[in-house]
Image: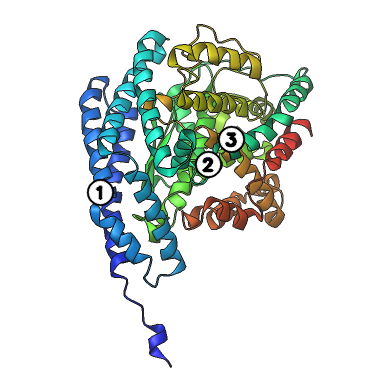
Amino acid sequence: MDTAMNTKQPTPSYDKLTAHFQKISHFEHFSALGDWDQAAMMPLGGGSERGDAMAELALHIHTLKTAPHLGDNLALAAQEVLTSEQHANLREMQYQYRQATLVPGELVQAKTKMAYQCENAWREQRKNNDWQGFKPNLKAIIALAREEALIRAQAQNVSPYDALLDKFEPGMTTAKLEQTFGNLKTWLPTLIQKVLEKQAGEPTLKLNGPFDIKAQQALGLDVMAYLGFDFNHGRLDISSHPFCGGVPSDVRITTRYNQADFSSAIMGIVHETGHARYEQGLPKQWRGQPAGLARSMGVHESQSLFCEMQLGANPAFLRQLQPLINQHLGCEFSAQDLARHYTRVNPGLIRVDADEVTYPCHILLRFEAEKAFIDGSLSVDDLPDFWSSQMQQLLGINTEGNYRDGCMQDIHWAVGELGYFPSYTLGAMYAAQCRFAMERSLGPIENLIDNCQLSQVFNWLGKHIWSKGSLLTTDELIIQATGEPLNGQYLAKHLKQRYLG
């Protein structure tokens, strides 16, 4: 046997990089838990000093990601004999290094501190519909986001908004989104109108609360268990805005409760559990390395929306939940009542409570606002009027004077995350595309749920999406999983099947 062919080639530069990025991962671990703690546990008075501490931590992580030796080691590692997976990890290291070196550390620190200040204030200001109080903070954080976008754009020779998109959706551009969302606009308004007409005479579920919060929490935990959440590596808490945070070995999800309506909190838990299952399913052998991270926010949202919409609003899923809901809440809802409730199309104010048919309209609004913020054609002062005009045009809803349920409802802009919102509708498209690909090999999802074979659904997702981490690019991931690149027509097919029959 030729032993030389089986001898592992030395990779000293690559090995130095893996050790360095493992160190970065350790600091990001505690940064993620600091974010969760602020949202779920920290008292209001702790916000100012927490912001200083998190800004210092962000600067330290940025310093590690821009260490002088990284450029040389990345170049040397590219010349070493690596496996295909190591090459993928190197590609992701190069991406992280490039993203970090584009922005000066002082801006990273200033933006992090301002984001914590703005978010901390937003929690009370939103409750009080205090637009005038929120506006100065939003102006400051938008100004920093624009500064970051311009710096990134000039360095990469792209548009400022493209530079922000690339942080959340590597490879995505404004032009691609405008084409994708433009196609969406050709069929969505007609679909909404047809579904509203079809559902006009159907009975609605009467929610006669109050529904005890502790009972809702217990119900939520049972739903998470049904969805396969690993409680040894995660937990559920309460926050002002539902989210999934933490790290794969310690996933923190939250929801918010309403005594008058249990349905929002429960489906919020289903949504966040989808995020959590993805995190818990990422490849363990690549933990601490860039290749072990989630592929993109669009892919991340596809997993949460797969749980919430492809599964959660499926009549078979609601047949399984019905006994749990009635047991915990002391109700007598039928599975048919629940199915009608969770598939009721009703244009509303709040994005996170929106039905899946009208939900893309909320994203279209935010996409247009973000582009306008970054190119300077929309000022913070004019945001409420812009918001009201767009809501009227897209959904026929007047938001004048209602800032809490209008332009102040989301946390994303309060923390400077411009460029994130398109990921939600991209996620819905990826989720629908994955569902039809899955059904080609497993049969209808409804049958799998009815036959207590939900594990097969998650096994498919684990094999084709979760276990891949960032070893593949987004396009490669979707093509390998479904047989073709992103195709928004699968979302149209899914919605027409479910809502028009």
Amino acid on which the number 3 mark rests in the picture: Thr
Task: Assess disc 1: are there few (<14), some (14-19) or many (≥20) residues with their C-alpha within 10 Å of its C-alpha.
Answer: some
Q: Nearer the viewer, residue 482 or 82?
A: 82
Task: Assess disc 2: are there few (<14), some (14-19) or many (≥20) residues with their C-alpha within 10 Å of its C-alpha.
Answer: many
Of circles 2 and 1, which is in front?
A: 1
Tell me which label, 3 or 2, sits earlier in the chain: 2
Position of residue 321 in the picture relative to residue 32 (left or right): right
- Provide the secondary structure element on which disc 3 rests: helix
Of circles 1 and 3, which is in front?
A: 1
Task: Examine the rendered structure and indicate whether residue 302 appears above or below residue 351.
Answer: below
- What x and y, as percent, mark residue 391? 60, 16
Position of residue 438 in the picture relative to residue 80 (left or right): right
Q: Quadrant of residue 34?
A: top left
Amino acid on which the number 2 mark rests in the picture: Gly
Residue indicated by mark 2: 298
Q: Quadrant for the N terminus, please.
A: bottom left
Position of residue 273 in the picture relative to residue 183 (left or right): left
Q: Quadrant of residue 77?
A: bottom left
Q: Nearer the viewer, residue 468 or 387?
A: 387
Q: Which residue is pictured at 30% across the width and 44% down the height? A: 28
Q: Quadrant of residue 93?
A: bottom left
Q: Which residue is pictured at 28% across the width and 56% down the height? A: 70
Amino acid on which the number 1 mark rests in the picture: Leu
Task: Examine the rendered structure and indicate whether residue 175 appears above or below residue 257.
Answer: below
Please report contact status of discs 3 and 2: CB closer than 8 Å, yes or no. no
Q: Quadrant for the C terminus, please.
A: top right
Q: Which residue is most to the top?
A: 401
Residue indicated by mark 1: 64
The Cα–Cα distance between marks 2 and 1, rounded to whole angstroms, is 27 Å
